[in-house]
Image (spheres, rainbow, N blue to C red):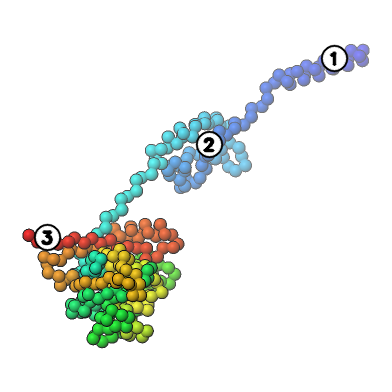
Amino acid sequence: MIRVRTLMVAQVLVLVAVAARAEPPPAAAPRSSGAVESFSDPGQAGPAEGAQAPKSADAAAPSGHPGPPRRPRRHRPAAAAAAAVAPAAAAAPPAPEPAPEWRTADPDNTLVIETSRGTVIVALAPAVAPQSVERVKRLARLGIYDGLLFHRVIDGFVAQTGNPNNHDGGKSAEPNLPPEFTFRLGADMPHVVAARPAGGATGLLQTLPYESVAEDRMAGSPDHRITAWGAFCAGVMGMGRDASPDSGNSEIFFMRDPTRRLDRSYSPVGRVLSGLEIIRGLAVGEPPAAPDRMVRVRVLADIPAPERPTVEVVDTAGPGFRSVVERARLQRGADFSVCDLEVPARVTPPPPAP
């Protein structure tokens, strides 16, 4: 009897096990398709160009409480997903840069130097070195510069001329000039700031490169101006001198390449607008074996109208040139210098005589 009962219990256990195997397992939670979903606040932008992604039921549930089961999302290939948002995600074409504004060079402060290699045109800077500029114009009008040699030309540095005896130390009969190594820069003077390093600024005063103390000091200055000085970049024209700071007279020099150690030690007179390649192509030497010369030097305003070229220069204070500055800063990065900025100019010769 005990044996029969044991057999019946064993059969029951077997039937229970079989039923358990036949019962389907509990439903598993749906697996994610791998797509990224945003659960950002309503004020935050979702991944599709600022559109808010809709919240799921899970997102709406309080923390720690699962929401109702959700249907698994169909996975779209990446290419199809990109195509779906392409119209909204397409970047707008960049706005065209403003065209540079051209202005006519001031004929009273433009120097035309006819050399043995071609014509060099210089924009003078009376706001920076007024006495030196007046001296250069006076000597040009007196014919003192005509025929003088470039008696000292150093590659990568300067080209010197303007001494009546064609040697260092030669002077005109005019009295020596005081130093004009710095000047007072005001907001009323047309200039563009290219960079603002800590405690200072650098830019262009029309065509002349300069550096200065920080512009915010203008407000506390009695004359609302700040101390600035010319930057001796390529093409800058300076007034030569002897060892004494107040010994400038007639000698002038042109920078073939930047040499910033001259800043605040020499008076900047102007900058080459056209013909820098001529300055760089002069015969080199101290003195050169076959020196080049200034054949004739005139102020543009003094040239008879039928012979006078038209000189135009880009307005560096206009929005068109500001894009040039930004492009140069982007290209040069941390190595950017005001000497990286060139001011475009164009010279139109006079029409031929009939």
**Nearest-to-viewer mark from 3 and 2:** 3
**Can you give x and y, in whole percent of width and height, for residue 14 in the image?**
80, 17
Q: Is residue 179 left or right of residue 10?
A: left
Q: Is residue 28 left or right of residue 78?
A: right
Q: Which one is earlier in the sequence, the residue at label 3 or at label 1?
A: 1
**Can you give x and y, in whole percent of width and height, for residue 164 in the image?**
25, 81
Can see residue 229?
A: no
Nearer to me, 120 or 130: 120
Task: Kindly state the secondary structure of the residue where label 1 is placed.
Answer: helix
Q: Which residue is mark 2?
A: 35
- Residue drawn at point x = 32 percent, y = 80 percent: 168
- Say above or below: 162 vs 333: below
Q: Quadrant of residue 189?
A: bottom left
In three-dimensional space, the C-alpha distance between marks 3 and 1, rounded to whole angstroms, equals 130 Å
Q: Which residue is mark 1?
A: 8
Nearer to me, 140 or 33: 140
Q: Which residue is mark 3?
A: 352
- Residue drawn at point x = 38 percent, y = 44 percent: 91
Asked if labels 2 and 3 touch by Cβ distance under 8 angstroms, the answer is no
